[in-house]
Image: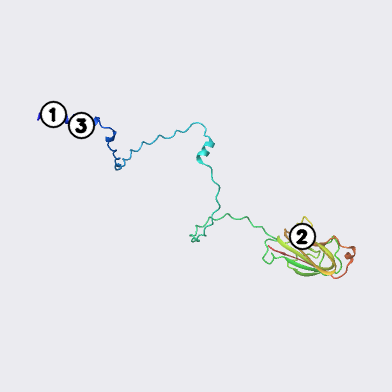
Amino acid sequence: MAGYYGMAVLVGVALLLTTGQCDVSCRGTDGRAGEAGAPGRDGFHGVKGEKGEPAVMDDGPVDAGVLLRLRGEGGSRGPQGVMGPKGYRGHLGPAGDPGELGQPGPEGKSIGQGGQLSPQQGRSAFSVIRTESGYPRYGQTITFQITVVNTQEDFAATGHFICRVPGVYYFTFNSMAKVSLCLGINSDVLTTKLGFCDYNRNNDQVMSGGVVLQLAVGQKVWLTSFRDQQRDAEAQDNHEKRIIFSGFLLF
């Protein structure tokens, strides 16, 4: 058995010597690259970190510019949207409770003379007509020859309407002449001249004017003629003329 092992050692030494004497022509071929291994498994999620500490507010003044940069600039205003459809009308709610009784009104005042007037006494209206052909004299109250209506005898023969029932009245006149004519409505309550003129040359011409006045008891309204641009010859005219003066209580 010992002789067998000795023989093996000698054979090995001989092989080493033979190999040491081999030149480059006896070199072995390169091996090929190994194949890539299979990908490994995903790792497990890490543990969630601890919550951070709250921010500390600075005790000093706050810079407005810094706040604006942090907040961002506001955008431009957008166009107005389309109006939506009209909603349905709701149901009528229940009636509310009755309100409290109001305070008594002020004591009423009597109108006219001798206490309050009846509905018939509270009406006032007149309409009169001037039939004279002569030109009405400048600055004088015009008088009338025909009385059409004078319910309360408030219009006097002097040509004045004298208020007996206080209230708001409407006064108007109409005239027809072949010459130029200027008429004015006069009253105790008027502070400015209220005149109307019509300049005519031998043609029938109609002129009218009117005013609403609030009168108290005793105040007057009357009609006058005045000079403006009329020719001297027109004041001597005797052609037919008509002037109608009317007034009535509105309320």
Does residue 113 appear in this view? no
Question: For numbered disc 2, what is the local secondary structure?
Answer: strand
Q: Tell us which disc is closer to us: 3 or 1.
A: 3
Q: Which of the 4 image quadrants contains residue 7?
A: top left
Q: Amino acid at mark 2?
A: Lys
Question: For numbered disc 3, what is the local secondary structure?
Answer: helix
Residue at 15%, 31% in the rendered image:
8
Residue at 28%, 35% in the rendered image:
25
Q: CA distance from mark 3 to mark 1?
A: 15 Å
> Which numbered dot is residue 15?
3
Horizontal relation, residue 102 to residue 217: left or right: left
Q: CA distance from mark 2 to mark 1?
A: 171 Å
**For residue 7, above or below residue 214:** above
The local crowd at label 2, few if under 14, some if 14 to 19, many if 20 or more residues have their Cα within 10 Å, is some
Horizontal relation, residue 160 to residue 96: left or right: right
In front: 169, or 55?
55
In front: 134, or 70?
70
Residue at 22%, 31% in the rendered image:
18
Give the farthest residue toward the left.
1
In front: 70, or 24?
24
Q: Tell me the residue that label 2 is attached to.
A: 220
Q: Tell us which disc is closer to us: 2 or 1.
A: 1
Q: Tell us which disc is closer to us: 2 or 3.
A: 3
